[in-house]
Image (tube, rainbow, N blue to C red):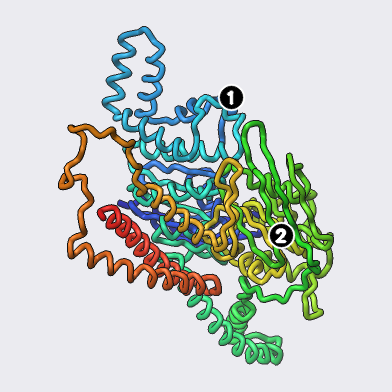
Amino acid sequence: MNYVSVENLTKSYGIKVLFKNISFHINEGDKIAIVAKNGSGKSTLLKILMGKEIADSGTVIINKDIQVVLFDQEIDYDPNLSIEEFMMTLDSEPILALKNYHQSLHSTDHDFIEKALADMEVHKAWDLENEMKQILSQLKITDLDAKMGTLSGGQIKRVALAKLLTETRAEHRHTLLIMDEPTNHLDVDMVEWLENYLNKAKITLLLVTHDRYFLDSVCDIIWEMEDQNLYVHNGSYATYLENKMIREENLNATIDKANNLYRKELEWMRRQPKARTTKSKSRIDAFYETEKVAKTDTRKDGLELDFEMKRLGNKILELKHIDKSFGSKVLLKDFSYQFQRGEKVGIVGKNGAGKSTLLNIIQGYEKADKGEIETGETISFGYFSQKGLTYKEDERVIDFIKEIAEFYPLANGKSLSASQFLRLFLFDDQTQYSPISKLSGGEKRRLHLMYILYQNPNFLIFDEPTNDLDLPTLTVLENFLQQFQGSLIIVSHDRYFMDRIVDHVLAFEGNGKIRDFVGNFSEYREARSREEALEKNTTVKPEPVKETVSTVQNPTSSNTKRKLTFKEQRELETIEKEMPELEDQRAKILEKLNNEADYEKIAKLSSELETVSEKLENHEMRWLELQEIM
């Protein structure tokens, strides 16, 4: 069943063309991810499909039998409504039945009560209520009486997500679900739950996300928006990268040919007499087309710089016996840690666990209840927070960066101009001379990131840097950080980003406990999963029973531990032989992943890692079962 058909769609803002004559189709069951740098028109395209924006030209045909539902980054809500009342503002018959049922609980009108109960049965609202409760529980929304106006930005987004998922379940019509950065403000457990939910749900999905693990798990089609065009890739993120590389190689070959032709035609143009024949005019037109191709700029994601970082002394940063609580909630308890030169530390944990509080304590923005912090004299912090950028409305991008310095120093004695540095972070010449107020939300976030890096700090602190950043920018940032010689702290829920950058994890595990784990984020999660599996399989010993004539067990009773069968014994021997081999194989793959920058190879290695880790986990579980039998 065809949901959406779009032909020759064009949209511009002033002289900036977002996309030109793009065409596509969305069919039932499609799960599509849109990949593009900020400012390319992703959000605008979604709004056109929702009817909130009008295209300059082209046709958009949406099947009359489907509903289109949007999860936007900007949430509309009445601050005076409770969470439960906000959830009940959905416009569907099952939700209306549920609303009437809740009202009937406080009513003495028997007819109203009977009708409410009948409507619950007719519209299957009992199932919907259970599913709504499960969704709210998974997104850690427990106080349904809380007013929307008292919630944090992250809480509001989670409530809005719960409402949207409930809406898609409440409607019996075909639904196209459009989601713009749904994983922002969700912790890892929530992201993985949503990932699993969307994977299993029989829905049609159009998604904008920067989370590459999430994208790969949920979507099987990628739309790439670039240079005013839309390219369709069937397959994984690795497939998209491979196709993109091939396209760019073909483009570069075309540019090389055009350059050769351009030099010959330029010579002819210079000798060209003023009187133009029809034949020469067509050749002149062809010349300008060749010139356009020859001057195409393909410099986009390359970032190979030898940075001249501010000197780091022997003393970096040391935290000694830090305590921090808010009322009865303990965030930090006797926490000590000494940061090393060049160390890249990832901080993970659930929302509200105290991650941002630790960052503020480190920089002196907040005081610890107890403990001591020693910061080296040479340390220059660069803090990328979630608060956003402060700027003058009419200030141009290039001027904003030049306020720091005209040039960015390199270790070889050379330097990059402010404009060159902006170009490395995907700000083209036109955007550099635009007012900051005209940038998209994602572009402002990218400029904020650049503003921090351009100050050349030697100790970077990033609090959720990947929120609202596009994938091309994340690729550039990852390349930058991999070459960064200073110390680095990252708080992030982006699993892919953390795996590529960090080599050490501080995990907030609740009640002030912070676990120090050497390795990347996926290694930490695997270690936790193994521990949880072992805890679940640890049998609880029963209370001893007083021996009487009637309670003493016969040695041959069924409770006596039996011996393994011959087949089980052989299986145990095989498992015990293969487990060390799998662990060794997994360690080698992880080592390759940590040193690999090529996305195609990363994708292949990640797939191998998943296969080996799953097999190892199955072996461990079966080993425990066989041990229990013995």
Name the kind of residue labelled 2 in the image. Leu
Where 410 falls versus 433 (above or below)?
Answer: below
Q: Which quadrant would residue 341 be assigned to in this image? A: bottom right
In this rendering, the answer to whether 585 lies above or below 255 is: above
Asked whether residue 393 is in view, the answer is no
Q: Are marks 2 and 1 in contact (CB under 8 Å)?
A: no
Front disc: 2 or 1: 2
Q: Is residue 446 left or right of residue 390?
A: left
Tell me where residue 219 appears, x and y as whole percent: 41, 57
Left or right side of 281 for 341: right
Q: Which residue is mark 2?
A: 460
Decide if residue 443 is on the left or right side of residue 34.
right
Query: Which disc, if any, is residue 80?
Result: 1
Q: Secondary structure at mark 2?
A: strand
Q: Examine the rendering and report whether any part of residue 299 can be seen.
A: yes
Residue 322 lies, with reference to residue 414, above or below; the image says above
| 85, above or below 36, in the image | above
In what element is the residue under mark 1?
Answer: loop
What residue appears at the point 25 percent right and 34 percent down from the top-left corner?
547
Estimate how packed mark 2 is, as few (under 14), some (14 to 19) or many (20 or more) residues with alpha carbons within 10 Å. Answer: many
Amino acid type, callout 1: Asn
Instruction: Left or right? Give the position of 555 relative to 516.
Output: left
Q: Residue at x 64, y 56 (%)?
A: 490
Residues 578 and 308: in front is 578
Pinpoint residue 426: horizontal percent, then vertical percent: 65, 66
Q: Which of 583 and 206 lies nearest the eye of the viewer?
A: 583
Which residue appears at 77% of the width and 65% of the height? 456
Quadrant of the image containing the C terminus: bottom left
Which label's residue is closer to the chain start, 2 or 1? 1
Residue 489 percent coordinates (x, y): 66, 58
